[in-house]
Amino acid sequence: MAPITFSITFPDFDLLAFLIAALAGFFTKLADYAADAEKGKAARKPGFSGPILAAAYGVLLAAFAARVPIAFPLVLGVILAMLVCGKIDSPLHALGLASFLFVTFAIGAPSAFVPLILFFFAGALVDEVSNDYSDSELELVRQRRRYAAASRILWLKMLQARLMLDLCALAASIVLGNWNLFLALVCFDLGYKLAARLGTHKTA
């Protein structure tokens, strides 16, 4: 009997594309900081102006989707979830969305499999709803100094981590045999978390 083998392949691997994805995540977080500063939720803005940051991450997302078309449904699904959840709630993020749409249609939008868009939309939606819930519950624990079992705190922290979209991207990569989907999300998350680490102001 032939041995069962498992291989991980990255069809049409494009290092520059994934560097662009990481930069998009980095600028998205900095734009978050700038948006919070405009709302009075942060002590000070990052070094670059908010509109430049927002336009930058929109352009970078569009450029990434053009270079790695299989990730286009992932980007669209996340954007739809943000719209439904009301997370595009500032002029800066509206500018980021507008710049993404403008560049996407200017250079030609890649084809997108609608069920895959809906799959990623569902994953991102679950992440946003569960993240909001965990934030509110953890805040109640802090404010009221209410006792919470360690297992519950761990569960709330897991919800806060937004793992559902990662699992969706992992599942899609396995089924489609193309790990560029999962790698795209990992690179974006790395850039986003790096900006969060480097952030020097606190939000309320």
Image: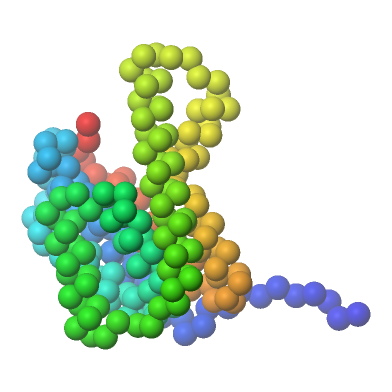
Residue at position x 54%, y 27% from top? Answer: 152
- 115 or 140, which is in the foreground? 115
Residue at coordinates 38% horizontally, 47% vertically from top-left? 128
| Left or right of residue 73, residue 106 in this image | left
Taking the spot 60% from the left edge, 70% from the top edge, the residue there is 174
Residue 7 in which image quadrant: bottom right
Number of numbered discs present? 0
Q: At which x and y percent is residue 97?
A: 21, 64
Q: Position of residue 182 (x, y in %)?
A: 49, 66
Outermost residue on the right side: it is 1
Q: Judge whether residue 30 can be spotted in this image.
A: no
Q: Where residue 92 sits: x, y (%)?
A: 14, 55
159 is higher (above) or lower (below) than 93: above
Residue 41 vs 192, above or below: the answer is above
Q: Is residue 10 left or right of residue 141?
A: right
Residue 3's quadrant in the figure?
bottom right
Q: Residue 158, how many percent across, how many down? A: 50, 40
**Residue at (50% x, 52% y) in the render:** 164
- Seen from the viewer's position, the closer of residues 135 and 22 is 135
Quarter holding the C terminus is: top left
**Residue 25 located left or right of residue 47:** right
| Relative depth, front residue between 121 and 52 | 121
Q: Which image quarter: residue 133?
A: top left
Residue 121 in view in this figure: yes
| Colour convention of the picture | rainbow
Image quadrant containing the N terminus = bottom right
